[in-house]
Image: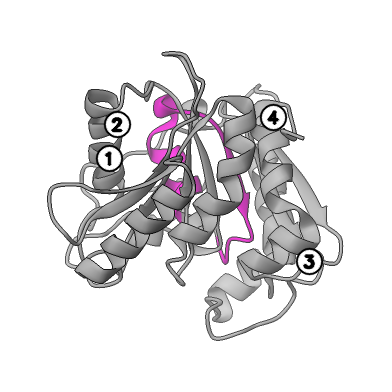
Amino acid sequence: MSSNVAERCAERAEADGGIVDWRFLGRSSEAYYLCLPLVRDALAPLLVCVHGISRNAEEHIRRFAPLAQRCGVAVAAPLFQECEFPDYQRLGRSGRGRRADRALNEMLAELRANAGVDVERIYLFGHSGGGQFVHRYMMANPERVARFVVSAAGWYTYPDSGRAFPLGIAPDPLLPDVTFDPDVFLRVCGTILVGEGDIGRSRSLRTGPVVDADQGRNRLERARRWVEAMNDEAVRRGLPPPLDLIVLPAAGHRFIDMATRGGVAERAFQCLFGTEAA
C-alpha cells in the first residue's frame, strides 16, 4: 500500500474525529479499515464488511460507520488486494494467491489482542464478490459466525455433497484443510439482499452452461434459487430454514446504487442486529 494512500486515510480519520482508522497487519500490502464506537463495552459485537472486486473497502466502512456508532457496534473492513488475493471470493485456493479466510482470522486475532474487540462470534456482510466470500467463509467456519448478510453475490456454493467446492461442499484438493458440515452451517441464520434490477449479465458475472443452468442467468434468480436450496436442505435435515431473501426495489447491482436506492446498509443492520440504527 503506497504511503500517500495511508496518509490520506490518516487525514480522513482525523477529520472524522478518529472513528475510522486505517491499520496495517504485518505487511504493507495487507490492511483493513476499523471503526470503533466512541461508547462501547467489552462485549460490543463486531461486524466485518467485505468488498466486491472493485475493492471499495473504504466506501463500505463509511456507509456503515454512522450506523455502528449509534448502536455501539465495531466495524472492520478488510482490503483483499488483487495482487495478494486474486481468489478471495473462493477463500483463496492453492496456487491462486494467499488464503483470504486465514487473513481474516489473522485480522480478528489482532483486533482481539490490540483493540479489545470481541471476536468470538462475528457478524458478516459482503457485497457481490464479498458476498461470495462471506457465505463460503460461513459455511467453512460456522462456529465463528453469529449471523450474516450477503448482498448481490454473483454465484453460490450449494449444500451439495456430490460436487466439489466451490460449486458444492465435497472436498476440494486446492483447499485440503477446509471441510463443510451442513448440520452445523445450516444452523447459522442469514439474509440475502438483491436489487430487483440486478438482472444484467455483465462481464463481472460468472456465466457458462453449468452455472447458468444450475443457478440461474442473473443475480436475482441465483439469489432466489440458493435461498430455496439452503432452506430445503435444512428442512430435510430437521432444521428450521435459516435464510431470508429480501429484494430491494429500484436497486441495481453496484454497492453505491444499493446503498442510495435500496438502503442496503440500513437493511443489513436491521437483519443483523434487529435495528435500523435510525
**Residue beneath the point at 37% across and 25% down:** 119
**Residue beneath the point at 67% across and 42% down:** 268
State the CA–CA distance, disc 1 to disc 3: 32 Å
State the CA–CA distance, disc 2 to disc 4: 37 Å
Identify the residue position indicated by label 2 in the image: 111
**Where 102 falls versus 166 (above or below)?**
above
Q: Mark 1 and 2 residues: CB-CB less than 8 Å, in contact?
A: yes
* Secondary structure found at label 3: loop
State the CA–CA distance, disc 3 to disc 2: 34 Å
Q: Mark 1 and 3 residues: CB-CB less than 8 Å, in contact?
A: no
Mark 4 neighbour density, 10 Å: few (under 14) some (14–19) many (20 or more):
few
**Residue beneath the point at 65% across and 52% down:** 226
**Where 62 falls versus 144 (above or below)?**
below
Residue 188 lies, in percent from the top left, at 56, 29
State the CA–CA distance, disc 4 to disc 3: 31 Å
Identify the residue position indicated by label 4 in the image: 235
Mark 1 neighbour density, 10 Å: few (under 14) some (14–19) many (20 or more):
many
Question: Residue 107 bears which disc, if any?
Answer: 1
Q: Nearer the viewer, mark 4 or mark 1?
A: 1
Residue 124 lies, in percent from the top left, at 51, 40
Between discs 1 and 3, the one toward the N terminus: 1
User: Is residue 267 covered in magenta?
Assistant: no
Residue 266 lies, in percent from the top left, at 72, 44
| Quarter the C terminus occupies | top right
* Secondary structure found at label 1: helix
Q: Which amino acid type is shown beneath numbered disc 4?
A: Val
